[in-house]
Amino acid sequence: MARIRRRDESVEVLVDRRERAALLQILERLEPMLDESTWAKPRAYEEEELEQEFRRLVGSDLDDSRSSDVARMRSSLESDGPILLSSDETWGWLRALNVLRLALAERLGLDEDGWEDRFSQRQHRRPPLATLHLLSWVQEELVEALAVP
């Protein structure tokens, strides 16, 4: 089973071949959703004119940053060796996981607290809810690893 822990100044992600393949498959399936997700591209302004100017000035930088975070996560998972993340790389994983989780939740119509109660235990153990739970777990473990002194 995957484990995530602090190791000196790095965060170590211990996953076997099967777990790496599963996480890579999740990335491949969810990444296309990012272009359609309002969470991946939240509005900065209510006024359309200001929003368009914001998008013109920083929109491509935000998109590039998001794509870079997902690409770095993919690259780490595709490597054969141990996954040791620097603090910056860990933050990149956290940003990628967050936007992927939000895009999936949006696709599933999960937009309010308490959504978990709408589903049976069986539904929680099957895709796509199991995918959402897995991404949340990885994100939580990374946060905890960063918090360790």
Image: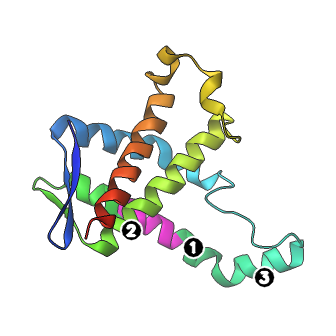
Graded by Cα atoms within 10 Å as few (under 14), some (14 to 19) or many (20 or more), the crowding at tag 1 reads: some
Residue 50 placement: quadrant: bottom right
Labelled pair 1, 2 in contact (Cβ < 8 Å): no
Which comes before the other along the chain, label 1 or label 2?
1
Q: Depth check: give the residue in front, 74 or 3.
A: 3
Instruction: Report x, y in % for residue 115.
Output: 65, 32
Residue identified by numbered label 2: 91
Q: Nearer the viewer, residue 117 or 58?
A: 117
Q: Position of residue 116 (x, y in %)?
A: 59, 29
- Give the vertical position of 66 relative to 17 (above or below): below
- Quadrant of the drawing holding the N terminus: top left
Is 56 drawn above or below residue 91 in the view shown?
Answer: below
Q: Residue at x 36, y 48 (%)?
A: 138
**Relative to 94, does residue 58 appear above or below in the rendering?**
below
Q: Earlier in the sequence, mark 1 or mark 3?
A: 3
Residue at screen point 57% across, 73% down:
62
- The image quarter containing residue 51 is bottom right
In-front residue for pair 53/83? 83
Contact (CB < 8 A) between labels 1 and 3?
no
Can residue 68 be seen here? The reply is: yes
The quarter of the picture where the C terminus appears is bottom left
Q: Amino acid at mark 3?
A: Glu
Magenta range: 64-71
Q: Give the residue pinned by disc 1.
A: 62
Which element carries disc 2, helix, strand or loop? helix
Give the labeled residue for mark 3: 53
Q: Is residue 110 above or below residue 49?
A: above
